Image (tube, rainbow, N blue to C red):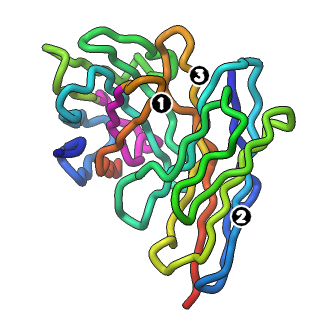
Amino acid sequence: AQTVTQSQPEMSVQEAETVTLSCTYDTSESNYYLFWYKQPPSRQMILVIRQEAYKQQNATENRFSVNFQKAAKSFSLKISDSQLGDTAMYFCAFMNPGGGADGLTFGKGTHLIIQP
Amino acid sequence: EAGVAQSPRYKIIEKRQSVAFWCNPISGHATLYWYQQILGQGPKLLIQFQNNGVVDDSQLPKDRFSAERLKGVDSTLKIQPAKLEDSAVYLCASSFYFGLAWSQYFGPGTRLLVL
């Protein structure tokens, strides 16, 4: 079974700063997907960024980028020029597409607070 | 494009009562998931449907939880009888494959409080 670990329960930074959220995972699979999801207070989960394990290039979506280290099983999220609207719970998630069962395995989350 | 719809948004029940949640996935999404998110934790997969068939229910407490997806569209998740530890947010999600890309979209969730 796969496990996902987020070791930072809470982080707080000033607006416009850069922040990095950490995630490690454990799997014996070679083909998988990794995700970062954002869950604002009392609002639904939305996808921030996705990384396919077969791709060596790190994914980027505007101010959000990842540092994917496959050998180290590490998948961190960097948020540049942080904004007040980035305040939310951030969840790292793993998916193995093999066999048709492709539900997500989530970490416990990191509560990110952007201070004005 | 309409998102994943869920109802009710909130439910309060007494322990040992039964409760049901409803989910309508994004149109055209063949795969539907139910997750349980206990306060302070990440979501945990309960069951996955592909069309109207079950793909994975290995983490579903089958002595009290049941789910169905008739006609391969809407789905209901039922708890009978509820326990205090079932207090959580129940999230429904649906997914599609586009080329080699895979995305899963979540609904707003149903917040259940068992007293």
Quadrant of the rendered structure where residue B106 is?
Answer: top left
Compute the Cα span from label 1 to label 2: 27 Å
Kindly identify the residue that appears in the image at 74 percent across and 43 percent down: A68
- Judging from the image, what secondary structure is the residue with disc 2 in? strand
Q: Please say whether residue B92 is one of the residues in the magenta stretch.
A: yes
Give percent across and percent down for residue B73: 17, 23
| Marked residue chain, label 1 | B
Quadrant of the rendered structure where residue A18 is?
Answer: bottom right
Q: Residues within 10 Å of mark 2 (few under 14, many from 20)?
A: some
Q: Which residues are magenta?
A: B79-96
| Marked residue chain, label 2 | A
Residues behind callouts 1 and 3 on a single chain: no
Query: Which residue carries the number 3 mark?
Result: A96
Quadrant of the rendered structure where residue B81 is?
Answer: top left
Residues behind callouts 1 and 2 on a single chain: no
Give percent across and percent down for residue A115: 58, 86
- Judging from the image, what secondary structure is the residue with disc 3 in? loop
Q: Is residue A84 left or right of residue A1?
A: left
| Marked residue chain, label 3 | A
